[in-house]
Image (cartoon, grey):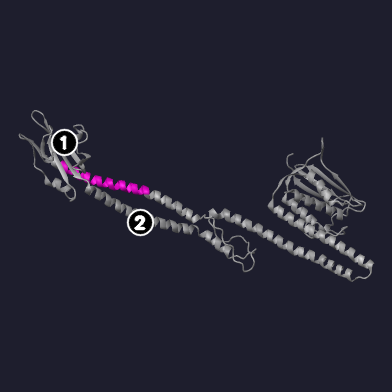
Amino acid sequence: MPAAGAAPPVPRRTGLSVRRRLLAMLLALFALGLGALYTMVRGYAYQTASITYDQLLTASVLSITDSLQYGQHGWQLDMPYAALALLEQAPRDRVFYRVSARDGSLVTGYADLPAPPRAPTSEAARTPQLFDAVYQGQPVRFAWMERHVAGPESAAVARVQVGQTREAHDALARRILWHGTLALVAFAAAALGLAYWGLHRSLAPIRRIEDELSARTVSDLHPIAAPVPEELGNLVHALDGFMARLEENLDTLHLFIAETAHQLRTPLAALRAQLQLALEEDDSDEQRHSLQAVLRNAERLSRLVNQLLSDASVLHRSNAHDFARIDLAEILPQALHDSVPQAEPRPDVRLYLPQNGAGAGQAWVLGDSLMLREALKNLLDNALRHGAAARGRLDVRLARAGSDWQVTISDQGPGLPPQLEDSVFERFVRGPGPRTAGAGLGLSIAKRVADSHQGRLTLRNRPQGGLDAILTLPALPS
């Protein structure tokens, strides 16, 4: 948590922007689309210009051909100048024509016009044909056809050929292309503007979430109220779940701090008072008595601090959920060694492990070895302080129960009072008449460990007296 008055953390810049990436993708798509449309418009422009001027050439050839007559003196032509006038509407273009007989003799026009690239059939030649060629250093478009006249001995054939340079044709194509390009650019600009506006509106829910989170206090962890689109639903749901878990952890932490402060305040005050009393005492026996009280209080305080640290460690590791395959038959003896006092008189504690042909068996579970060891140590410590009478016995048994492993700790104490059945697993709740003072955290730690391992912790009074504490954990295959 930042200190009061501290500047807010600077957002981390990763160079990744959804808006820029989407705009880049849209620009790339528009560039490809404009390139394809430009190619189509260019083809359309030149095709339209070609069709227009090809129709003029065809009309001129047909007009001249209709005016061609065959008589006693051969072919005669009364040139219809209107036919050429159609082509002369393009002032920068030049027009060429030629009329020749079958034997190649010139009737009229330009004698050196290039011949068609290939001679079609007689029937096809009676309709206008088109081809391109270079004449006098310029590209020229030609149209030609043949006129057949039946004579007394044989049919007379004449060929009419008309050509025009391409300047007007190219100018028309460029004009159409320019107008089409302007329309494309205007369309692209409007489409890009609309896309940017749509992208801006589409990202508005993210800005609303950002504004809502920025306006919150550090302790405000309620779910996000801003409406979000379906695509952001999973993200917001995950964020709400994270804040809910964080709020739960913070509440637990605040409660832990408050209860810890309350629990530590009393023994610390008593310890200070007893030390002050010991310093003021002149009688050595009374001073010794006061120092022994200080020692007992220090031991109680040490135990309280250790259990508080154990509780905090279990809480942290249960949230981390870093589990592995572990053997309860190995952890249980370790917990016994740490919990059972080694000094005399030692309590009568008996351990029963599962047996196989080679000796002690194995009890595999999925869990955290430190957490399970702490849970077992707290259960054993609770049984020793509340259940093991002076001449009583403590039985610790590990056995298989169906698909689970069960650790049963049986004591010969007074059992669980009915008034504590609902609150026994709460933190800082102490049972009646313990042999030694405790912090009231042991059972709550063991219960949290059982819950985090998908197991159960149950307490059951025995008919013959005493209490069974049963820790049940899901078993893994051996």
Q: Position of residue 112 (x, y in %)?
A: 15, 38
Q: Is residue 447 magenta?
A: no
| Quadrant location, the N terminus | bottom right
| Quadrant location, the C terminus | top right
Residue found 82% across the figure and 46% down from its top = 333
The residue carrying mark 1 is 146
Residue found 88% across the figure and 69% down from its top = 279
- The three-letter amino acid code for the residue at tag 1 is Glu
Q: Position of residue 239 (x, y in %)?
A: 60, 56
- Note whether residue 268 is visible: yes
Residue 226 vs residue 88, the one in the foreground: 88
Q: Position of residue 188 (x, y in %)?
A: 38, 54
91 to the left or right of 24: left
Taking the view exactly as shown, the residue that stands out farthest to the top is: 153
The residue carrying mark 2 is 186
Q: Is residue 54 magenta?
A: yes
110 to the left or right of 315: left
Circles 2 and 1: CB distance less than 8 Å? no
Start-end of magenta stretch:
35-62
Crowding at label 1, few (<14), some or many (≥20) Cα neighbours within 10 Å? many
